[in-house]
Image (spheres, rainbow, N blue to C red):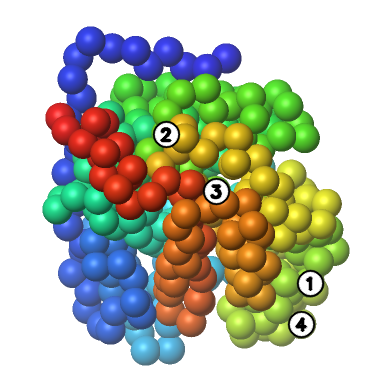
């Protein structure tokens, strides 16, 4: 069941913590407001989440790190990061479900804030900013980061009952989320936006299933693990270090089919959403998506690049509103 988040009490946006000071070079090109700059300060993280210490090891330079091909180590690192930066005291996900890389997820949120800022001089903050997270997953990561960084209100949706149950449990276990996140199950399994959008949203965001099949997902993961593991012989038997079930990773036709479907559905809600957005993992998918959106009548289409270390990513944003209409939207909805 969805969580009842109605409250007469005004919830002030939570000021994000400053980045832990880096001892060495910064991770390349993270958003300037992303607090996950530089090397992880494991002393500070262990202070907030002591169980992380059991997974520490030294790299060849003698710096503290973890084995990023170890799914347990990644899970405990995430728990520490969420506790330190986002006030999350309890974060549990079902076995085998996706354990997201938090710095990259935070980048998406901060670039979305920049997208909204185009219509005013400062970032719109507070619960009057309403965001739809399509496919929130069992980890509920985007509502956590967005609500704790900017005070936005999120509607978190998914088609998977286990993910909905887990996301609900995370929200209920953390008081800082209960007035900022509503969890709603998408009951129309063939729909993405239909059945969910029944009011105005300032943003939609999505991390779509990237692959057409689990065999494709496993092949991609195998290549990634080769870059993480020194023991190449163990790669063929390794798990995905960030996990992921078929419902999270795959859909018929892969990412491009999912995004084209979402684009077509978005026409129906042209006047109810200021900006539709989604991550796009494969750069080759951008051109056909832009062509389709132009055909569908989108007034604005943006592609925003992001990078973290050697990983390059991007998201696509589109709106059926003109810049003038968006300015009116901002005055009406974000004035408080």
Provide the residue designation for mark 1: 219
Question: Residue 313 location, x and y as percent?
Answer: 51, 70
Q: Which residue lies at the image location 71% right of the left edge and 47% below the top edge?
A: 261
Provide the residue designation for mark 3: 206
Sequence-wise, which precedes: disc 2 or disc 1? Answer: 2
> How far apart, in angstroms, are the residues tagged by discs 4 and 2?
49 Å
Secondary structure under the numbered disc 4 in the rendered image: helix
> How far apart, in angstroms, are the residues tagged by discs 4 and 1?
15 Å
Mark 3 or 2: in front is: 2
Please say whether residue 308 is visible from this viewpoint.
yes
Q: Residue 182 appears in which quarter of the rendering?
A: top left
**Dot 1, how many residues are within 10 Å of its Cα: few (below 14), some (14-19), or many (20+)?**
few
Q: Which residue lies at the image location 73% right of the left edge and 27% below the top edge?
A: 188
Question: Residue 150 location, x and y as percent?
Answer: 25, 43
Asked whether, in this view, residue 232 is left or right of residue 176, the answer is: right
Mark 2 or 1: in front is: 2
Q: Which residue lies at the image location 47% right of the left edge and 67% below the top edge?
A: 303
Secondary structure under the numbered disc 1 in the rendered image: helix
| Residues at circles 2 and 1 in contact by the CB criterion of under 8 Å | no
Mark 4 or 2: in front is: 2
> How far apart, in angstroms, are the residues tagged by discs 3 and 2?
14 Å
Provide the residue designation for mark 4: 233
Q: Which residue lies at the image location 57% right of the left edge and 14% below the top edge?
A: 1
**Dot 4, how many residues are within 10 Å of its Cα: few (below 14), some (14-19), or many (20+)?**
few
Q: Quadrant of the C terminus?
A: top left
């Amino acid at each position: 069941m969805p969580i009842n988040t109605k409250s007469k009490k005004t919830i002030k946006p939570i000021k994000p913590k400053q980045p832990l000071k880096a001892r060495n070079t910064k991770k390349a090109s993270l958003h300037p407001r992303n607090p996950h700059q530089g090397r992880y300060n494991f002393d500070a993280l262990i202070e907030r989440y002591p169980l992380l210490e059991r997974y520490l090891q030294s790299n060849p330079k003698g710096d503290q790190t973890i084995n990023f091909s170890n799914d347990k180590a990644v899970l405990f690192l995430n728990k520490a990061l969420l506790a330190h930066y986002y006030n999350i005291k309890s974060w549990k996900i079902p076995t085998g479900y996706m354990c997201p890389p938090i710095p990259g997820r935070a980048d998406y949120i901060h670039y979305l804030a920049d997208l909204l800022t185009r219509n005013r001089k400062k970032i719109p903050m507070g619960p009057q900013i309403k965001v739809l997270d399509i496919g929130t997953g069992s980890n509920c990561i985007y509502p956590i980061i967005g609500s704790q960084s900017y005070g936005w209100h999120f509607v978190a949706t998914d088609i998977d009952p286990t993910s909905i149950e887990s996301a609900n449990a995370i929200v209920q276990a953390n008081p800082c989320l209960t007035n900022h996140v509503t969890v709603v199950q998408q009951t129309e399994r063939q729909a993405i936006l239909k059945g969910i959008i029944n009011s105005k949203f300032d943003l939609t965001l999505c991390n779509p299933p990237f692959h057409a099949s689990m065999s494709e997902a496993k092949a991609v993961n195998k290549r990634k693990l080769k870059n993480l593991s020194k023991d190449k012989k163990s790669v063929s038997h390794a798990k995905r270090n960030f996990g992921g079930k078929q419902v999270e990773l795959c859909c018929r036709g892969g990412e491009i089919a999912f995004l084209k479907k979402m684009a077509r559905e978005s026409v129906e809600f042209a006047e109810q959403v200021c900006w539709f957005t989604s991550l796009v993992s494969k750069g080759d998918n951008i051109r056909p998506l832009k062509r389709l959106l132009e055909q569908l009548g989108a007034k604005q289409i943006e592609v925003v690049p992001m990078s973290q270390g050697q990983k390059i990513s991007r998201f696509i944003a589109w709106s059926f509103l003109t810049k003038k209409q968006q300015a009116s939207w901002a005055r009406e909805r974000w004035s408080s």
